[in-house]
Each structure stands twice: as structure tokens, then as C-alpha cells.
Image: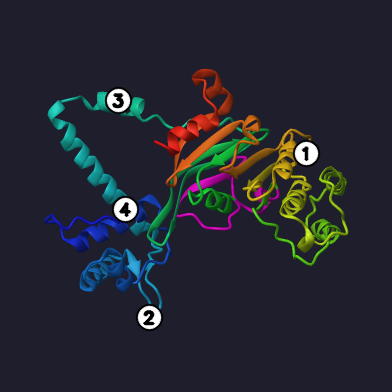
Amino acid sequence: MTLKFNTRDPVYLQVIRHFKTQIATGELEPGDEIPSRRELANTLKINPNTAQRAYKEMEEEGLIRTERNTPSKITNDEAMIQHVRQELLTTAVEEFVQAVRPVNVPLEELIELIKTKYPSPDVKKEGHPMIEVKNMTKKFGFKTVLQDVSFTAEKGEITCLIGVNGVGKTTIMNAIMNLTPINKGQILIDGNKLNKKTYEKVTFIPDAITMLPQMKIGEAMDFMADFYESWNAERANEMLGFFRLNKDDRISTLSKGNTAKANLLMGLALDVDYVLMDEPFSGIDMFSREQIAEVFTSHLIEDRGVIITTHEIQDIEHLIDKAVLLDEGTVYRSFNVEDIRENEGKSIIDVMREVYRG
């Protein structure tokens, strides 16, 4: 929240407008907790009485509700939320009309100009399999870590989320798997909102193996077979041989490279349509990276949709279909890798240099 202290606009009203905007845009949803008055005052470096006045007026207006000894929360009253949206929309339209009035342009021409300048997003073909992330916004407290992130990952393609550490790649993965709530936006799998059925189509391979260290690889495989109906034992054993792993080896005794391979085995042995991989090449030796990269050209991946996060793409650049470059929590550029090679003569690394070195 950015406050202007050098205007005649009272600070408490700026605070109220900020909350109204977050409610109207869906960044704050019904029932969401908001900071205490003192926390808000400390964060914004304003007088606690100013924060108190803003909260008092929002309570009187019905925007927030506060019960004894509990944090204040956004109202659950849908009629009030709709009223806030209408209020902000009316204000925006009035300001727009005032700005364009001197130009003396007919309304029909304005509408046509708006449609041309800001076209509606393309609607995907019915039944076209993909994961869609639409306008994802994620905040931790008052810090926005993702802002209006949108991209698609189609089945049969490898989509790579690229960015320096801390740019939000893992947060996106966690959001797709519903491991962290988002403040705004939508995630669809094959056109459907996230639910138990959609998750049966997806496997998530985190950057660290989640099996107990004392388990043997064979025991971990048995656990997966008992827990997941989609476990493919034949594929698991094939990968065991491909990676030259031993069922009797304990996870705690594996090298970093072999731990990464075992982690990959547990995820790829599931018969699912989409595979999410978080930094599969991080911290492992060159030979293990090469062997894992071979998986991307094998039948173990074919026909699946893959989303992979990495900032070390040199081993798989030639395998990626689509790149999504993230910078400071936003999508800086999203492109088909072959198209940019053909049309601009650039590699992914060339584009990364433009983005991250200015």
C-alpha cells in the first residue's frame, strides 16, 4: 500500500480506498483476515489512531467485521462486496469520461477503440487439454510475491518457468497444487477448477524427496503403490534400471544425484496427464543432470504436459517448448522457443540476458 502524505486526501480515507480496491478486485476475499490496527500502523508508519479511524469507519460501513478477541475479517456479505465493486467501477468510469470529454469523441467510437486496444483474451478450444493460470496474484502479508501471472501449459509440451531464486516459481507450483492459497486469479486444469478429480491428473515432484530417509527405495515404491491407484509398477521398475538404482539402498545413503533420480522416479511412475517439477537439476552433478535430461526425450514423458521450474536451463534448453520468464513476481515474457529462434534468432539464454541484465 502506497500512501501520499503530501496531499489534502486524508490518510485514513486512503487506507479505506486501498481495502475497497482489494475487495473489489478479489485480492481480499470474504472472510479473509486483515492485519490488526497496530500491525497496519507499524507497517505503514502511520499514527495508530489513523488506523483505528479507518477500521472504525469500515466496520460501520459493513466492509469488515470484528469479533471479540479475534482478528478483523472481510465481510461475507456478497451484496456489500458487489456494492463496493460498483462504487469503484462508477468512480473509474466518471474519471474516464472527464478525461476524454474535451476530445469530443462519440461514445460508439470510444467503445470500438477500447475493444481494439484491449481485446478480450482468446478463449481456448473446448476440450483442449492444458493447465491455465489466469491473473494469479499472491501476497504474504503486505508483500506481493506474484502479480497477475498468466500462462498456459499444454499437454504434450514442456513449459519452463524461468527466473532467479525468489522470483516466485515455487509459489506458482504450490498454488497449482493448492498447497498455498492465492489472493486473486484462477487455475484451471482441462477447463475445470481445482478439485479432487483434477488432481488425479497431476503429479508434483518437489525439489527435495519427501520419503523418510530410513526407507529403502523399494519400500518407498511399495508405499507409492499402496497410496496411489495410478502407480505404474512396470514403469517404476523400468526407471529403476534406467537410473541404475538399487531397491535395497536406503534414501539416507544416496548421493544428491541419486536422490534426485529416486525423487523423479516416484513422480514419473504415476499414470497422470501433467507433471510438475520444481528445480530437478538444482545442486546435482553434471552426469546426473545429463541422465535426468534424457528422461525428457523418452516415452516416460511423451504426451504429458510438463511444467518445470529452473534457473539452470543449459542442460534442457533444446527440449523446452515454451518459456515463461518471471521477473519481480510478474511474467516479463512468455514465448514459444522455436518461434523466437526462427523469428528473432535468439536462444532462451539470449532472452534471459536481456531480462535479467537489463
**Which residue carries the number 1 mark?**
300
Labels 2 and 4 touching (C-beta < 8 A): no
Labels 2 and 3 touching (C-beta < 8 A): no
**Which residue carries the number 2 mark?**
68
**Quadrant (top left/top right/bottom left/bottom right) for the C terminus:** top left
Find the distance from the CA under tag 1 to the CA under tag 4. 46 Å
| Quarter location, residue 312 | top right
Position of 295 with respect to 357 (left or right) is right
Work out whether mark 1 precedes mark 4 in sequence or the reverse, and give the earlier one. 4
Q: Nearer the viewer, residue 263 or 201?
A: 263
Question: Which residue appears at 19% of the width and 36% of the height?
Answer: 97
Labels 2 and 1 touching (C-beta < 8 A): no
Does 201 appear above or below 139? above
Q: Amino acid at mark 3?
A: Leu
Callout 4: SS? helix
Residue range of the region highlighted in magenta in the rendering? 177-200
**Quadrant (top left/top right/bottom left/bottom right) for the N terminus:** bottom left
